[in-house]
Amino acid sequence: MTTTERPELSWLDDVTMTELERNPYRTYERLRAEAPLAYVPVLGSYVASTAEVCREIATSPDFEGIITPAGGRTFGHPAIIGVNGEIHADLRSMVEPALQPVEVDRWVDDLVRPIARRYLEQFENDGHAELVAQYCEPVSVRSLGDLLGLHDVESDRLREWFAKLNRSFTNAAVDENGEFANPEGFAGGDEAKAEIRAIVDPLIDKWTAEPDDSAISHWLHDGMPPGKTRDREYIYPTIYVYLLGAMQEPGHGMASTLVGLFSRPEQLEQVVDDPALIPRAISEGMRWTSPIWSATARISTKPVTIAGVDLPAGTPVMLSYGSANHDTGQYEAPSTYDLHRPPLPHLAFGAGNHACAGIYYANHVMRIALEELFEAIPNLERDTREGVEFWGWGFRGPTSLHVTWEV
């Protein structure tokens, strides 16, 4: 099927950002069925929606990584998720050493477990909690904040930063001229970046003169000639990437896993009784509601035909990994959380040379946090008086999760 033979997709003209943020599944289910690679007007971009097409593009030598326009406006250049060649190789070499499994195994338990216990102590005797705000997000941001060297930045401020950067990064709607439909939507992200600079600039000054074992200090010094450091303007876009994606992914991943388990009480009981099942529960939670739902993109480097669509060189394509993880060609009843689903590779962490560098770290943050939660409160139940609302198109997770238990 060529571009001139594609099915009529005029219904896409009516798709809005509000619809995508509240419930993208309906739109993407139809895209997977009718056009796995289609131009979505509100996004001003082609979108890949099936597992096959997403994986093909992510791993193809005919595509390079690119940042979405809203992402570029939010992070600036050179953000690690939107560059290629020598710059991408250097940025990956900057962030990856500390995230190698042998390194993570050395320190992750000592980093995360005390943080998880500290937050649990604040509410474990209350008999009720809102886990997104009181546990999942705080453990996630505090763990990464301390790893980066931001020990003195309060967790609530870190949560505020990633919320503002999220709103900015996903402010992707364009008008008929291809301009941002809501330019004011970047204001929160700009405020967050100004706060980040005010706090991190003095730390960079300190780390430049007195290196320590914090991640940002290593980013400045590792691989550089003696007496030289990477320029702060060079690493700031990647700092912003971490303060958004890496900050939110473990928190939203564990929250989504909990919502999924609450939908299957017998499976929740199995996981509480056997903590060895926690990694499997997390993997299914990440597939079921991918925290990074549709936030990465590629650009064709030459004319190429994908899924019957002819793309000229220089065509951007957004990869919807959240949609790919609900592909009925890959998964039976994908909208259902199922701990015992046959294990299949999912795309929650991406694919290709721009796959998430922190896969191992993120999985262990979630594992440790859920181990501690179930150990402290094994009789956890969802408070059914409160609903669970998911939000987000680029990044997705529950906005709140109210629970109760008998003390």
Image: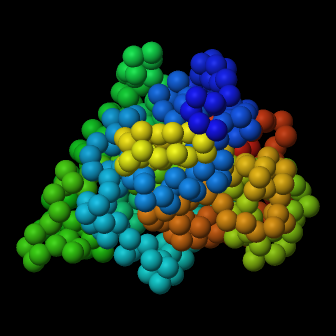
Does residue 13 appear left or right of residue 174 in this picture? Answer: right
Q: Is residue 263 visible?
A: yes
- Looking at the rendered image, the quarter that the C terminus falls into is bottom right
Does residue 1 appear left or right of residue 248 in this picture? Answer: right
| Number of numbered tags placed on the structure image | 0
Residue farthest along the right direction in this orientation = 266
Residue farthest along the top direction in this orientation = 176
Does residue 96 appear left or right of residue 328 in this picture? Answer: left
> Residue placed at 38% from the left, 29% from the top?
186
- Looking at the rendered image, the quarter that the N terminus falls into is top right
Q: Is residue 254 visible?
A: no
**Residue 163 position within the rendered picture, expressed as x and y whole percent measured from the top left:** 48, 39
Q: Is residue 393 above or below residue 138?
A: above
Out of 379 and 248, give the one closest to the viewer. Answer: 248
**Residue 109 position within the rendered picture, expressed as x and y whole percent measured from the top left:** 54, 77
**Residue 12 position within the rendered picture, expressed as x and y whole percent measured from the top left:** 62, 23
